[in-house]
Image (tube, helix red, strand yellow):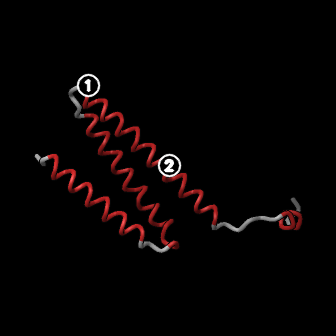
Amino acid sequence: MIDGFIALYILILAAILGFEIISKVPVVLHTPLMSGSNFVHGIVLVGAMIALGHADTTLEKVFGFIAVFLGAGNAAGGYVVTERMLEMFKPRQTKDDNETKGE
């Protein structure tokens, strides 16, 4: 089993590395990056559900439920944000466009 301090050290290193990598991403690649991260969040959600399924004590079940809840919210929120970002790239229809189409 990993010692608590080693796990904390790995978490801090992962956070710093993730911040450095994401801050260097060009604006054009943010939408594909969001789609990829949504996929990863789905995998995290599946892992949280598996962990919840193997929970024995009440404390493990509570932590598992919180993990599933936050993972589902994170995945759903990522898809909502991606959809809003994609809407920004669609051409806007003006009133003149609607009148020429007979609407």
Note whether 34 is above or below 65 in the view shown: below
Residue situated in front as seen by the camera: 51 or 103:
51
In-image side of 33 versus 67 (left or right): right
Q: Quadrant of residue 100?
A: bottom right
Q: Residue 58 has which mark?
A: 1
Q: Residue at x 13, y 48 (%)?
A: 2
Identity, as a three-letter code, of the amino acid under mark 1 = Thr
Circle 2 SS class: helix
Q: Position of residue 43 (x, y in %)?
A: 34, 51
The residue that appears at 74% across and 65% down in the rendered structure is 92
Q: Quadrant of residue 89?
A: bottom right
Give the residue at mark 2.
Answer: 77
Looking at the image, residue 66 sits to the left or right of residue 30; the answer is left
Instruction: Indicate which disc, 1 or 2, sits on the residue closer to the N terminus.
Output: 1
Q: Amino acid at mark 2?
A: Gly
Q: Nearer the viewer, residue 91 or 100?
A: 91
Q: Tell me if mark 2 has few (under 14), some (14-19) or many (20+) residues whose alpha carbon lies within 10 angstroms of its own.
A: few
* Marks 1 and 2 in Cβ contact (< 8 Å): no
Residue 6: x and y, percent? 15, 53
Total label count? 2
x, y (%) of residue 69?
Answer: 40, 38
Compute the Cα span from label 1 to label 2: 28 Å
Quadrant for the C terminus in the image: bottom right
Q: Position of residue 30 (x, y in %)?
A: 49, 67
Between residues 102 and 43, which one lies in front from this camera angle? 43
Q: Quadrant of residue 46?
A: top left
Image vertical order of residue 33 relative to residue 40, above or below: below
**Label 1 Cα crowd, 10 Å radius (few <14 / some 14-19 / many 20+):** few
Residue sitting at 41 percent across and 59 percent down? 37
